Every structure is written in structure tokens, then in C-alpha cells.
Image (tube, helix red, strand yellow):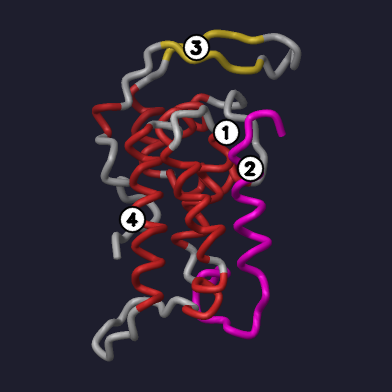
């Protein structure tokens, strides 16, 4: 299975030096209906890279991508085709892992095979949506990253919980820019 990074690690698709957006458009905190331009500074790019998981949590919870420079930079990284493809690959790897018995020497957090196999069609729909050329909301990408990396989440070993399908439907909805 393709593994995703832990908090603070690069997602493999984007190097720190590749985050080069020079000018950001952000919501003016003093005048919420107005937009201001702000130069992207190196320390902000580094901070956004190091705090990727925290920024993903903020985006997934609905914080606007234009609310701060760091969140805007993170949103730009998340919506890139390479990141989306990596997440789709991880979802398909998860499906493949669920079809195989667990290996006794595997020390990773065990996935809930029953829930994953029962949600195969929705997971495949999510992977296809990530691979499509249609624009997506960074909030949805952040939500999917957290879903895949949170070892206490619905993808992982809690067979009695009936929470995976609802989380997957929420992820698909969160990708929609009109919502």
C-alpha cells in the first residue's frame, strides 16, 4: 500500500522549493468583503510546509483558504494534480490491502477490511473524482488526507463502528466547489 506522510513530512509530490507562489490574494480581516494581495515570504512557506497537518485540519473544518498566507499556500499544494493522484493511488492501495490477509509482521495500524470492502464502490468513486481534471475544493483534499492518515479514523480497526460510508460521502461533498 502506498503510504502517506506523517504530520510535518512532505507529501512526496511537492518539494518545499516548489512552493513559489509570489503573490497571494487574501481576505482583508478589517474589511471581510475585500481582498488584499500579499507577498509570499520564505518563512511563511517553510511554516506552511512544517505545519501541513495542522493546516489540513483547519481547511477540512471549513477555514477559508484565503484567510491566511499559510493556509492559502497549503491549499495551493493540496489541489495540485500530483497530490490528488497520490491520494487516489493511496485509496486504491488501501482497497488492495483490504483484499489481502494481514501479515503478522506488519506493525502499521490495522485497517478495517470489512468496512473498506463494503465501501469499495464509494472509495473507487472518490479515487476517480481525485483523478478527474475538474477543479476541486482544497477543503475536500485536506479532509481526504486526514481520513487516510488518521489511525483512529473510520478506515482503521474499529469493526463495530458504522462510520466509513458517511465519512466518504462527506469527503466527496467537500470536493465540490459549489458547496
Mark 3: few/some/many CA within 10 Å (<14, 14-19, 20+) = few
Task: Name the residue that disc number 2 marks.
Answer: 174
Question: What range of the chain is rendered magenta?
Answer: 152-179
Note whether 155 is above or below 142 in the view shown.
below
Q: CA distance from mark 1 to mark 3?
A: 22 Å
Which is nearer the N-term, disc 3 or disc 4?
4
Task: Provide residue 25's location: percent of width, then percent of height.
Answer: 54, 13
Q: Can residue 2 be found in the magenta stretch?
A: no
Mark 1: few/some/many CA within 10 Å (<14, 14-19, 20+) = many
Task: Name the residue that disc number 4 marks.
Answer: 5
Q: Nearer the viewer, residue 175 or 26?
A: 175
> In the figure, is residue 167 to the left or right of 97?
right
Quadrant position of residue 140: top right
Which is nearer the N-term, disc 1 or disc 2?
1
Q: Nearer the viewer, residue 168 or 72?
A: 168
Q: Nearer the viewer, mark 2 or mark 3?
A: 2
Residue found at the very far front of the displayed protein: 121
Quadrant position of residue 132: top left
Task: Provide residue 59's location: percent of width, then percent of height.
Answer: 58, 40
Task: Provide residue 62's location: percent of width, then percent of height.
Answer: 67, 40
Residue 38 disc label: 3
Mark 4: few/some/many CA within 10 Å (<14, 14-19, 20+) = few
Task: Name the residue that disc number 1 marks.
Answer: 137
Q: Is the C-beta separation of discs 1 and 2 under 8 Å?
A: yes
Q: Can residue 164 be found in the magenta stretch?
A: yes
Which is nearer the N-term, disc 2 or disc 4?
4
| Number of numbered labels in the structure image | 4
> In the figure, is residue 98 to the left or right of 18?
right
Residue at figure coordinates x 48%, y 55% from the top left: 124
Q: Secondary structure at mark 4?
A: loop
Which is nearer the N-term, disc 2 or disc 3?
3
Amino acid at each position: 500500500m502506498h503510504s502517506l506522510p506523517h504530520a510535518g513530512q512532505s507529501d512526496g509530490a511537492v518539494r518545499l522549493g516548489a512552493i513559489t507562489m509570489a503573490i497571494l490574494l487574501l481576505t482583508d480581516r478589517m474589511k471581510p468583503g475585500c481582498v488584499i494581495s500579499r507577498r509570499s515570504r520564505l518563512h511563511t512557506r517553510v511554516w506552511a510546509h512544517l505545519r501541513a497537518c495542522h493546516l489540513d485540519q483547519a481547511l477540512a473544518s471549513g477555514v477559508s483558504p484565503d484567510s491566511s498566507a499559510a493556509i492559502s499556500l497549503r491549499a495551493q499544494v493540496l489541489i495540485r494534480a500530483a497530490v490528488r493522484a497520490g491520494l487516489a493511488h493511496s485509496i486504491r492501495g488501501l482497497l488492495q490491502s483490504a483484499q489481502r490477509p494481514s501479515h503478522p509482521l506488519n506493525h502499521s495500524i490495522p485497517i478495517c477490511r470489512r468496512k473498506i470492502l463494503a465501501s469499495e464502490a464509494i472509495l473507487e468513486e472518490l479515487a476517480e473524482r481525485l483523478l478527474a481534471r475538474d477543479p476541486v475544493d482544497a477543503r475536500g483534499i485536506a479532509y481526504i488526507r486526514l481520513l487516510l492518515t488518521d489511525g483512529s479514523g473510520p478506515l482503521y480497526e474499529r469493526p463495530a463502528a458504522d462510520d466509513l460510508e458517511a465519512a466518504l460521502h462527506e469527503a466527496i461533498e467537500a470536493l465540490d466547489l459549489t458547496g
